[in-house]
Amino acid sequence: MGVPVKNLTDRLGGINLYGGSLSLITMDGKLLLNGIPNTKFIYANGTIFLQFMWPNGFKNFPCSNDTPETYKLDIDGKEYNVRCSTVEISGVQSVYALALSHEGIASFVYSKISYSHIALVVTMVLLVIPLVFFVSSMITNAQREICLHDKLIKQMEATQQAERKSMNKSLALVGASHDIRAALAGITGFIDLCLANAAPGSDFETYLKQMSLCAQDLLGLLNSILDTSKIEAGMMNLEEQEFNLADLIEHVVDLYHPVGMIKGVDVVLDPCDGSIIKLSQVKGDRGKLVQILSNILSNAVKYTVEGHVCVRAWVGKPDFETKILASTRKGLGKYMSSLFSGKNDGNSDIKAVSAVRQNRDSVEIVFEVDDTGKGIPKEKQKSVFENYVQVKETAAGQVGTGLGLGIVQSLVRLMGGEIGIVDKEFGEKGTCFRFNVFLTAFEIQGDAMYGGTNSSFAIRNCSPKLGICTPSPKLDGSQVVLFMQNIERRRVSQKFLESLGISVLVVDHCHHFPSALKKIQSKLNYLLNSSRRSDMSCRSDISSSSSKEMPLSAMEGTEHKLPFNRRKDTPSFILLVIDVNAESFSELWRVVAEFRRGLHSTCCKVIWLDKPTSPCIDPKRLNPDDEILLQPFHGSRLHRVIKLLSEFGNLSQGLSSSSESSKHPYGKTRLRHTQCNDEIQGYVSSSNERYSKQGSSSPTLERTRGRLKSKRKNKDGAESSNGEKPLIGKRILIAEDNKMLSILAITTATQLGADVEHCENGNEAFELVCDGLKAQRNYDYILMDCEMLPMNGYEATRRIRIEEERYGVRIPIIALTAHTSGTEAMEAGMDAHLNKPLKTNELIEVIESIETKE
Amino acid sequence: MDLVQLQRQLVDYRTSLYHEGFLDEQFTQLQSLQDENNPDFVVEVVSLFFEDSERLLNELSKALEQQVIDFKRMDAQVHQLKGSSSSIGAHRVQKLCIVFRNYCEAQNVEGCLKCLQQVKHEYGIIKTKLESMFQLEQQILNAGGSIPV
């Protein structure tokens, strides 16, 4: 063998026979392995025998046959199969005996099989259990889903039913509104009729007036309820109308300003960056916007007892979302945007939104109404927009249906925007509402230049109201001193003026006012006297509100006078804007007068801001250059003042160049506020147009203008009233049934300065004259048409003459006839006659002749 | 057309209206009543005249179609028309109204019918002419000029 025997035997011995054993012997008789217990090999006669030894004997088995033989044996109680045969191992003939248990190795397997059975069963079980679990849970889920689905359907039906009910209610309400309104109108009408007949000053009249007020309140309440139901019924549509946004905002703010002033709350209009002013005409629903603003403003004023309410508006910068929506109009764009917006049901919303925003000309206007009132607690902020909810803690004592904000929210949403409450800074109290709407811009003027830049006024080519069409070089040394009581208004005005590049000095306290003026005075004098260097230390702590920019603006002010600006010679212009609330008028006036005395070559102009309700400025004591403006100082008035500055070369013009309004604020206060604004606008724009077309044809306005015209100094001189107003103060009754002739007569008489009343037949004329006689207020002249029905002029005159005798007066009656001869007229008792149609000169002649006769 | 041409055209047109008797000096009176406080006075009054006259003419037509003609009422209406037309200086219309009234007093149906036709005709003419004049004025205003008096 070439292999060491030891290795082989070791190897063979090491085989795991699973309970079997192996014995090996070479043919030569060399025992290699004796694995089978109780056995031995015996070599006899050329064959090898395997000898088994039992306790009671032994047995031999032949083993060296070439063919394997198998013997069954019992060893130690177990049955073994013994296999013997010859085998050749590396050329060496040997005999082996292999004893295996009866069933062979398979028995081993069988013994193990139970394990595998168990394992298999366990695995199966382990598999089945989750499966079962899974299936059962699926089933329960499905059941639950079906259940939920059912519930959902039922719920949806219920909701739909509720909605339908509500819709029906709304529709019914809207439908009934007509009747309700008619009834209310009837009530109001009859109350008015009663009022007409009530004895003035009696209790009856007071009661009737109260009733009328209640009816008006009812109407207001009805309107707000109806608005809600209209919106809910989907009947609220947007009306497109052109209007001026800046005017509208100012109009609304001015409406609430008096209310606020009475409470001590200042209502300020903050022009922010001036972007609204640039946007002169817009298209949108004016009425609804006014409604929204009014509602929020009225709430703000209602719930604030001190401080201010600030209204801001600016043009929103187009944001990313709108750009996307605008640029990708179809399909993919919508899909993508809905993805980004993360809403599954957002598609319809986005469609609606993009419908509003897609308009290329559409511009977003953001409004903010900020107040310093009680504020709304965070929890309640969402719920105030729900209908009929009022924040009870702050609503004590306030009236209101609680409908307002709900309607406002719906209206804002209708206009494509959203409204919400903005958190204020820590420590600031009050509420700030912010909302945005989308309007179509009509004329956008250039690009906004926000903030003050060096080059010019930021406002160019804007509405004629400002009239600043060309950029002027940096203001030639104008300095504005603002002295206002209200902090917010001061801050707002200062910011706006500074954004335009005007240097502003702000004074907050009356004590500081004189010292501030003195400092300016001294600075100016110093600069004018000295040459190059300015004494920076002179620019000390001019007391003012705490803003850090303040010293800068003062410095700017001084720099203007510095030769850096290359203006050594031109004196600067100082504009003082003084709020009369702050201090007693005489005190202020004294300080200002002193200041004026101290100024040598600087021009100084003072604008006094007076309260419209209780004017306290004595106009006689004013310097002729000074102006009186009515508060509030914002909006158009602010612009007029700025205009003043920029065109300061026309000092003589002043604010009242084409308006007498500022010189006669008291007269104006008698007119309605809106008329006031109209007139101011009219007068300012009249420099551009010959005729101001606003509201001038209403006869009431005519009459009041007629009165005012007669009082003011005639600057324009275009009318025929160049001194000729022969009928000033006269009361004339015109009795004429033909509409056109009556208009003619009325206008003629009015133009001559008379107060004219008109009636349409003889009966009325007679009655009016009788009333006048009783009340001792007679007409000065009567123009009586002769052909009237049912009672003609002659008959009426006769009756009037009879009545007059009782009082001993004789009113001149002038007949208007179509006939050339006036005999019948004279017979009836008239004093003169004229031919129709009435001519001015003839009227004057006749009146003069009557006068001279008497 | 430039401004000066327009203005000249207006003046010529106006003068022609006076010359041809369509307008009389009452119209000038009307214009003198228009001023800053009343910038659209003439237009307003003339519009009123148009409305009034059309109404009256319709009623007169209807009245003449009745079986029984109410001359008294017609007389009153013609009186009104006469007054209106005189108030703006519509000279020819006014003259015709006088004739019309005579026919009414005489209760002459044919005469009334004939007169009514004539009045309608004249009214149509004066309306067209006044409207053209106003258009011219508007053009001048739009061109930035002022109306020559």
Image (spheres, grey):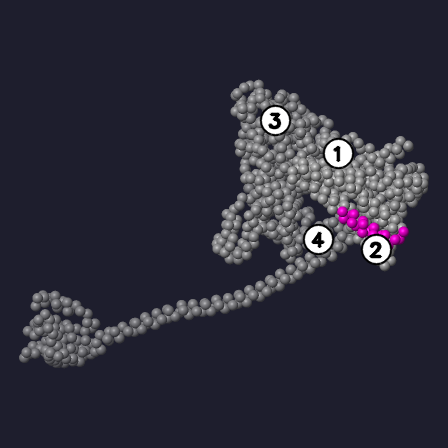
Q: Please provide percent x and percent y for residue A35.
A: 14, 72
Is residue A702 something one can see in this rendering? Answer: no
Rounded to the nearest whole Å, what is the CA distance between mark 2 and mark 1? 47 Å
Residue with the mark numbered 2: B64
Dot placed on the residue nearer the N-terminal end, 4 or 3: 4
Task: Same chain for labels 2 and 4? Say yes or no.
Answer: no
Q: Residue at x 79, y 36 (%)?
A: A751
Residue with the mark numbered 1: A719
**Against B6, is A543 above or below?**
above
Q: Which amino acid does the dot numbered 1 rest on? A: Glu
Of A648 and A270, the residue lying toward us: A648
Residue with the mark numbered 3: A573
**Against A667, is A45 above or below?**
below
The magenta stretch spans which residues? B106-125
Q: Nearer the viewer, mark 4 or mark 1?
A: 1
Dot placed on the residue nearer the N-terminal end, 3 or 1: 3
Q: Please provide percent x and percent y for residue B113.
A: 83, 53
Q: Which mark is residue A222?
A: 4
Q: Residue at x 81, y 44 (%)?
A: B92
Of A377 and A24, the residue lying toward us: A377
Rounded to the nearest whole Å, what is the CA distance between mark 4 and mark 3? 55 Å
Chain letter of mark 3 equals A
Q: Residue at x 86, y 33 (%)?
A: A848
Rounded to the nearest whole Å, what is the CA distance between mark 3 and mark 1? 36 Å
Q: Nearer the viewer, mark 2 or mark 4?
A: 2
Q: Nearer the viewer, mark 3 or mark 2?
A: 2
Task: Same chain for labels 2 and 1? Say yes or no.
Answer: no
Q: Residues within 10 Å of mark 1 (few under 14, many from 20)?
A: some
| Callout 2: SS | helix
| Callout 3: SS | strand
